[in-house]
Image: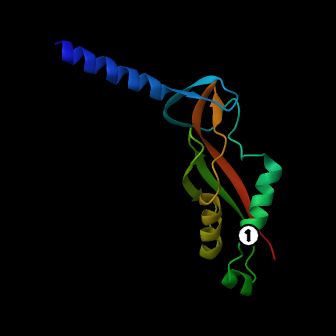
Amino acid sequence: MKKFLQIFVVVSLIALLHLFSIDCAGRTVVVVNDTVYYFTDRAAQYPGGQKLLSQYIARNLHYPSYARQIGQEARLFVRFVVCTDGTIDKVTVLNPTHSDLDDEALRLVRAMPKWEPAIRNNCRVKAYTTLPISFQL
């Protein structure tokens, strides 16, 4: 019985430690369940803000050669989940057009560095983010 109680206490402490995390300002925040939110108190953000996100896209977007040859242009909306640790998951194109452009938009988003996660009620949460990606010749 004593051994069982010790194991129970250790497992409980480990479980509690996984519920809490330290945010970038040094505050302790609670990491909530696997619910993915559409609306949060603070949206997920690219590290460094919108200006650096625009620079990332400009530097890393590769116009597919076949789409360029046929003059294919599009403005795609890519939706993805920013997880509580900032990783990107479940990347989808909401308005697929040309497969080469769709694939490039997916590659671009999947290759992004970790984001700053969304905050809801002072907790890091998973949240949907939608990003427009323009292919213009």
Residue 109, picture quadrant: bottom right
Residue under circle 1? 74
Residue 82 lies left or right of residue 75; in this view the side is left
Residue 121 visible in the picture: no
- Residue in front for this viewpoint, 122 or 101: 122
Its colouring scheme is: rainbow
Q: Residue furthest bottom?
A: 69
Crowding near pointer 1: few (<14 within 10 Å), some, many (20+)? Answer: some
Give the total of numbered labels: 1
Spot occupied by residue 52 in the image (x, y as percentages of width and height): 79, 53
Spot occupied by residue 90 in the image (x, y as percentages of width and height): 53, 52
Spot occupied by residue 129 in the image (x, y as percentages of width and height): 65, 46
Residue 122 lies left or right of residue 50; in this view the side is left
Q: Quadrant of the C terminus?
A: bottom right
Residue 41 lies left or right of residue 21; in this view the side is right
Q: Quadrant of the N terminus?
A: top left
Q: Is residue 63 above or below residue 109?
A: below
Residue type beneath disc 1: Ala
Q: Residue at x 72, y 68 (%)?
A: 61
Q: Residue at x 57, y 47 (%)?
A: 87
Residue 56, picture quadrant: bottom right
- Residue in front for this viewpoint, 57 or 132: 57
Q: Is residue 48 above or below residue 111?
A: above
- Residue in front for this viewpoint, 48 or 81: 48
Q: Residue furthest top?
A: 2
Residue 110 lies left or right of residue 53; in this view the side is left
Q: Residue at x 66, y 45 (%)?
A: 115
Q: Residue furthest left?
A: 1
Secondary structure under tag 1 reads strand
Q: Is residue 28 above or below residue 62?
A: above
Residue 36 visible in the picture: yes
Spot occupied by residue 117 in the image (x, y as percentages of width and height): 63, 39
